[in-house]
Amino acid sequence: MGKATSFQTTHARRVNMKPLAAKPNLRNQQRVDVSTDITIEKPDGCCLTCQVSNLSRSGVMLSCDQDTVKQLVPGLKTPAPGHWIEVKTRFSVPVIANQPVTVLADGNIVHMRRIARDEFQIGIQFCEFEGNGFDYVDRYVAKLLSDARNPSSEAH
């Protein structure tokens, strides 16, 4: 898919996320179930595609097969606090109906667990967004949470 430069934008501002304590609360934001592709770029420029299983304002949970996880998490060992694995993420969220925007965010792999024989979950905590990425994620998560609270509004 390309090298690290593929995530560059010409006029994006960067938004820093608040740093977390050594042992983060993995449930500090409400999550919404989402099924979409996400591209993960490792520091060496290698890009991998995974499936998003849920999204929050502070991070994303991925569903990956064992081969993909082996490439992202050396030795299949969950990263220790403070020794997280840095990655870049690229995924799309719909800002207005049928008009997705691409979100670019730097993050850290902070969680990994095996779900089934060839299915793993990887948790990525966002640490920095490019451009309006945080605003896009914030609006999308808020809309999905609102829709979940008011299911009758979806029928109209």
Image (tube, grey):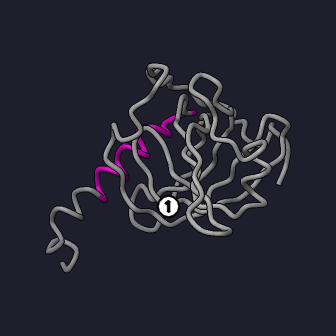
Most common SS among magenta residues: helix
Callout 1 environment at 10 Å: few (<14), some (14 to 19), or many (20+)? many
Name the one closer to the observer, 108 or 3: 108
Residue at the image position 60 percent from the left and 41 percent from the top: 104
64 relative to 140 in the view: left or right: right
Q: Residue at x 63, y 65 (%)?
A: 119
Helix, strand or loop for disc 1: strand
The quadrant of the picture occupied by the N terminus is: bottom right
Q: Is residue 7 above or below residue 114?
A: above
State the image quarter where residue 73 is shown: top right
Measured as percent of width and height from the top left, residue 155 is found at: 20, 80
**For the point 77% across and 52% down, which residue is it?**
70
Q: How many marks?
A: 1
Range of residues picked out in magenta: 130-144
Question: From the image, which quarter does the C terminus lie in?
Answer: bottom left
Relative vertical location of residue 144 with respect to residue 133 in this rendering, above or below: below
In depth, the one of 17 and 78 nearer the eye is: 78
Does 143 sit above or below residue 125?
Answer: below
The x and y percentages for residue 37 are 61, 62
Q: Position of residue 111 (x, y in %)?
A: 56, 42
Frontmost residue, 83 versus 127: 83
Name the side, left or right, on which 21 lies relative to 115. Answer: left
Is residue 137 found inside the magenta-colored segment of the image?
yes
Residue at (48% x, 56% y) in the render: 93
- Pick out the residue farthest to the bottom: 155
Q: Quadrant of residue 26?
A: top left
Instruction: Give the amino acid at mark 1.
Output: Ser
**Can you identify the residue that label 1 sits on?**
53
In the rendered structure, the answer to whether residue 42 lies left or right of residue 92 reads: right
Asked whether 122 falls inside the magenta stretch, the response is: no
Residue 143 position in % (x across, y down): 29, 56
